[in-house]
């Protein structure tokens, strides 16, 4: 079976009945998303226009706010001031900051020549409310002074109008006792961060967001002085996961290729070994994405047995490969359960498919309707396909056209990834390692989606 057109530029639906075993696969329809309801209006405020996108702040009990509110979701750092505005009177502005346990935060809101009577709310990393204040700062200004940070993590701040009765401009300031300019920075994978251990007992805290199954490599390299660096890594639950003194070059600390056990915010402590040395350093984290297809059950219409079996196409070994006959041929992998992913990489051998389809499905036993995109190749090696964010149990490739001289198709690896933040490799990592990256919506627009079914190779 083949599609009447190999390169779809408009939406196409082809239902080719599967007769492999017991019956036909069934297409899975997705219902349209339900619009988020608008927030309840205050007695003196009109409700937002119908269809206005709304966002729920990540704090229990906080009201919905318009997604276009530029004050919301900003991060405030030590010693900095941000400007905001409460408008309308039921507006709820929310902010974040990062803190390490043992530190203490002071938060102040100053009304700016308006009738605003602001209220300040502090939330813990789990979203629960820790404390609030109305006007301890005088002149109707709220003040939360030297509040202790009992756990390390990302804290929340809410700024509202007291009793939702006033509106106007304000400024918000945050100061963190026990922290210096190196502390509580959010790290981006692949970026170097400069810091200094001074005095020798100094400890600097950093954070990064991780995904379950990612591999993290954290380096702390001396950059002046006599520093003998030391690293700790803590998980989202606060438990210590790893530490290192000098696994890097010389006396540099390196936590290498650590597999993250869950999604969430990770905490890194950078210090000197024994608190006995000081100096400058450079710190970086590199995150590599897990290959969701690695060693998962895979199947193909046919294979060149016994040397090129389907499982050789996703075993992580670049010395083995799958190969199957030309014409129309399918190869697919069962991820074991529905998983979220947004990229497929195919490492083609010399007998690559010049035209092929990559799709995803939740069909029973992976036999049924697949939705995906048509692609083409013109060289051996890796082809990277950004699919947009998808969730499914099965991922498949249907190969349609072989090279003119080839009697089969063949690839070394078929890989599936859920990629997130931008990243760059460590110098010591192989060139073909897959790193976390920002993935565009898709290689093609949604109108290029095609839907097909795995068919019986004998039809």
Image: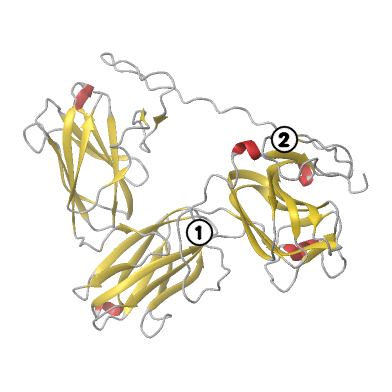
Q: Which residue is mark 2?
A: 12
State how the image is colored: secondary structure
Q: Is residue 352 above or below residue 75?
A: below
- Image label count: 2
Nearest to the observer: residue 264 or residue 324: 324
Residue 73, percent from left and from top: 33, 41
Residue 358 lies left or right of residue 62; in this view the side is: right
- Toward the viewer: 375 or 17? 375
Q: Label 1 neighbourhood size at 10 Å, few (<14), some (14-19), many (20+)?
A: many
Q: Residue at x 66, y 44 (%)?
A: 392
Tag 1 or tag 2, which sits nearer the N-term? Answer: 2
In-front residue for pair 425/139: 425
x 84%, y 70%: residue: 307
Instruction: List x then y, in percent, for residue 391.
Output: 62, 44
* Residue located 28% across and 34% down the image: 93
Asked whether residue 362 appears in the rendered view, the answer is no
Answer with left or right where residue 139 lies relative to residue 406: left
> Label 2: how many residues lie within 10 Å, few (<14), some (14-19) or many (20+)?
some
Residue that badge 1 annotates: 436
Quadrant where the N terminus is found in the figure? top right
């Amino acid at each position: 079976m083949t599609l009447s057109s190999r390169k779809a530029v408009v939406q196409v639906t082809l239902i080719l009945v599967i007769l492999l075993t017991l019956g036909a696969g069934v297409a899975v329809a997705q219902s349209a998303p339900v619009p988020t309801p608008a927030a309840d209006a205050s007695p003196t405020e009109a409700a937002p226009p119908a269809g206005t996108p709304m966002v729920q702040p990540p704090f229990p009990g906080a009201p919905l706010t318009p997604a276009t509110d530029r004050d919301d979701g900003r991060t405030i750092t030590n010693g900095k001031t941000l400007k905001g505005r409460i408008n309308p009177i039921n507006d709820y502005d929310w902010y974040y900051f990062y803190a390490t346990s043992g530190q203490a935060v002071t938060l102040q809101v100053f009304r700016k020549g308006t009738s605003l009577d602001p209220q300040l709310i502090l939330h813990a990393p789990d979203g629960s409310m820790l404390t609030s204040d109305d006007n301890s700062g005088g002149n109707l200004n709220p003040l939360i002074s030297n509040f202790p940070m009992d756990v390390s993590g990302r804290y929340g701040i809410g700024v509202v109008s007291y009793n939702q009765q006033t509106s106007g401009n304000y400024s918000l300031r945050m100061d963190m006792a026990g922290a210096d300019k190196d502390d509580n920075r959010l790290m981006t994978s692949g970026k170097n961060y400069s810091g200094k251990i001074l005095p020798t007992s100094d400890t600097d805290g950093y954070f990064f967001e991780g995904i379950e199954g990612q591999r993290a490599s954290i380096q702390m390299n001396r950059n002046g002085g006599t520093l003998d660096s030391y690293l700790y890594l803590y998980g989202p639950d606060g438990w210590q996961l790893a530490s290192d003194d000098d696994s890097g070059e010389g006396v540099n600390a390196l936590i290498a290729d650590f597999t993250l056990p869950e999604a969430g915010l990770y905490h890194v402590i950078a210090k000197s070994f024994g608190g006995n040395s000081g100096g400058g350093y450079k710190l970086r984290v590199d995150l590599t994405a897990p290959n969701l297809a690695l060693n998962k059950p895979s199947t193909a219409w046919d294979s060149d047995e016994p040397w090129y079996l389907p499982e050789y196409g996703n075993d992580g070994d670049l010395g083995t490969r799958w190969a199957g006959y030309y014409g129309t041929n399918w190869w697919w992998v069962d991820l074991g359960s529905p998983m979220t992913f947004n990229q497929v990489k195919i490492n083609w051998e010399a007998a690559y498919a010049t035209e092929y389809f990559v799709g995803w499905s939740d069909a029973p036993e992976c036999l049924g309707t697949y939705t995906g995109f048509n692609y083409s190749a013109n060289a051996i090696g890796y082809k990277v396909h950004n699919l947009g964010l998808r969730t499914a149990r099965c991922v498949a490739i249907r190969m349609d056209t072989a090279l003119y001289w080839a009697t089969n198709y063949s690839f070394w690896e078929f890989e599936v990834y859920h990629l997130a933040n931008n990243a760059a490799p460590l110098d010591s990592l192989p060139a073909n390692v897959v790193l976390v990256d920002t993935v565009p919506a898709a290689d093609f627009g949604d109108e290029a989606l095609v839907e097909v079914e795995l068919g019986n190779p004998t039809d």
